[in-house]
Image: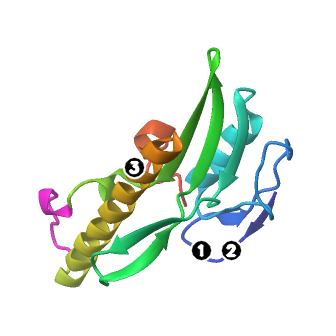
Amino acid sequence: MKLTTVNKKFKQGIYKPINSKKYRGNDYPRFLSSWELKLFRWCDLNEDVVEWSSEGIAIPYSNPVTEKNSTYFPDVAVKIKVGGEMKKYLIEIKPFRQTIDPKTVDHGKKRKKTILYENLNYIKNLAKWNAAKKWCVKMGYEFTILTEKELGINKYENK
């Protein structure tokens, strides 16, 4: 695994799968956080995972913020053996705070510009996730968002 420092705030780099036959992609996957790296390792090393990819699925959606058509690339697609059947999941990794409506959060002393950014980002993410859910129904996948809670991560571990 080669680590690079693109953004000093987060661990980023290229992940070289140990079980490369399970990974579906032209290049090695690039992780943008330690949370993604944790999921990559889990997919790579879990015996029940049959195949996985990183940002390998393109889902068109209408961006309500820019009012333009765009493309969403979910973080991971994975096929897993569960009991006697195969399950397919489309996974997005996000901090929990980005999965809830910012209007419901106490912003304390945050600047108005930051609050506006959080609201616009949330609106855009909802559009992406709704498009992903529709795509998943058609393609036989289940869409799920993993946060630090599901990943068992301390929110400060990403640094």
Please state, as top left, top right, bottom left or bottom right, where the C terminus lies in the image: bottom right
Q: Quadrant of residue 120?
A: bottom left
Q: Are marks 1 and 2 in contact (CB under 8 Å)?
A: yes
* Figure check: 125 above or below 92: below
Q: Gap in Å between the C-alphas at discs 1 and 2?
A: 6 Å
Please tell me the numbered disc located at residue 133: 3
Q: Position of residue 158 (x, y in %)?
A: 53, 56
Q: Position of residue 41 (x, y in %)?
A: 71, 43
Q: Position of residue 113 (x, y in %)?
A: 22, 84
* Figure check: 45 above or below 117: above
The residue that disc 1 covers is: 8
Q: Nearer the viewer, residue 108 or 148?
A: 148
Residue ranking furthest to the front: 138
Question: Can you tell which of label 3 and label 1 is closer to the viewer?
Answer: 3
| Left/right of residue 119 with respect to residue 85 in the rendered view | left
Crowding at mark 3 (Cα within 10 Å: few <14, some 14-19, many 20+): some
Crowding at mark 1 (Cα within 10 Å: few <14, some 14-19, many 20+): few
The residue that disc 2 covers is: 5
Q: Gap in Å between the C-alphas at discs 2 and 3?
A: 33 Å
SS class, disc 1: loop
